[in-house]
Amino acid sequence: MAKTMTNADNFWLSMDEPTNLMVITAFMEFEEPLDYKRLLATIDSRIASFPRFQKKVVKPKSGVGLPSWETDPNYDLRSHIHRVALPDPGDKEDLQEMVSNLTVTPLDPNRPLWQVHLIENYGDGCVLFYRIHHCIADGISLMHVLLSTADTDPDAPWPTARTKKKKPAFSLRSALPLGSLVDSARKTVTKTRKMGTALAKEVGKAAKDPDHLKNLARTTGRVPTDFAKVLSRLTIMKPDPKTPFKGRLGTRKKVAWSDPVPLTRIKKIGKAIKSATINDVLIATVTGAMRSYLKTRNVPVNELDLRVAVPFNVRKPGTEFELGNKFSLVFLPLPVYLEDAVLRLKEVKRRMDRLKTSPEPYINFGMLSGIGYLPPDVAKKAARLFGNKTS
């Protein structure tokens, strides 16, 4: 049975480009080889059991309107699981090279948009490398889905189909300490969703004429007041300065990662700075790394703020296993100018706290959904309009 894709999911489908594939990647390392038949059964029961993993994306023949999810009549689990091996010596460098090559390979649009590679000959064990298109789901839900494939008991019984959990009762007001702000934000999201076509037309015009956004932001009678304020702030926001972090993207990607960092260490750092979150510590660390890198390129950093787009979860608790995209993006300026790591973390936390208590994440989610309604070429132009504001 065909089902129309949501605006938010279509946004990420429309953003797909050869130089920037909208594919979420993740990998798991194993100390021992995996049993291939058991792997097939595990993925079949715990990933492919979600109907969306057996559906392909079908775009409207007219070229107008939203794509639909339709069951692939030729679906075969074995077409999505590939067994490969690293060349000797099968070390971390070899794995990074293979992952880099797989990362830039587009997914087959004639099949459900996901792949799993079993990479063998990695030391004494192996690696599972997942590639799932962003239109299927966001990182929050995919993290829960992928982690559900791993048993906590090494002698666990043969995998069987997952059981659906009953959704807990939920109150947005009781779950988030934002009071009337949450009510206002929720109403704003509802309004922006209802605007649908109208919002899409306005953003589409803005893609051709940036001044149109400024006029729209001033005309608060045509849009919700909070929306107009956020839109106004985005339109007058100047693009980031040119640094080595800005430039044309290429198709070739280099994938690398550090050794694991103990989570207890991250939490300890956060607690020392008046309950900074794990995310605050992560962003502050990235900010410090950017500062160090720019200094090696002789870029002046002592007065530098660099803006990034940060994912912001807008899911209701208890809906983590519901596929689809339910997150927003917020524009966060990173205090690259701060040399002291403690002051840098405090400032990152202060800026993130301000965003968390504003309606901006919810309004931006409505705006992303509006862009997702546009034809793909116009949607990309609209996305670049805002993307150019960041590094």
Image: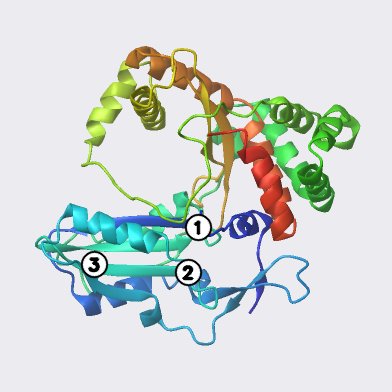
Percent of width and height locating residue 56: 56, 75
Tag of residue 21: 1
Tag of residue 119: 3
- Side of 62 relative to 384 (left or right): right
> Can residue 14 be seen here?
yes
Neighbour tally class for label 2: few under 14, some 14-19, many 20 plus, Cα within 10 Å: some
User: Which numbered disc, 1 or 3, marks the residue closer to the eye?
Assistant: 1
Q: Amino acid at mark 2?
A: Leu
Neighbour tally class for label 1: few under 14, some 14-19, many 20 plus, Cα within 10 Å: some
Percent of width and height locating residue 159: 28, 73
Can you say whether 204 is above or below 128 in the image? above
> Can residue 148 be seen here?
no
Q: Amino acid at mark 1?
A: Leu
Pick whichever of labels 2 and 3 is earlier in the sequence. Answer: 2
Colouring chosen for the image of the structure: rainbow
Can you say whether 386 is above or below 97 in the image? above
Residue annotated with mark 2? 107
Q: Disc 2 on helix, strand or loop?
A: loop
Q: Disc 1 on helix, strand or loop?
A: loop
Residue at coordinates 73% horizontally, 49% vertically from top-left?
A: 370
Pick whichever of labels 1 and 2 is earlier in the sequence. Answer: 1
- Side of 98 relative to 319 (left or right): left
Percent of width and height locating residue 82: 32, 75
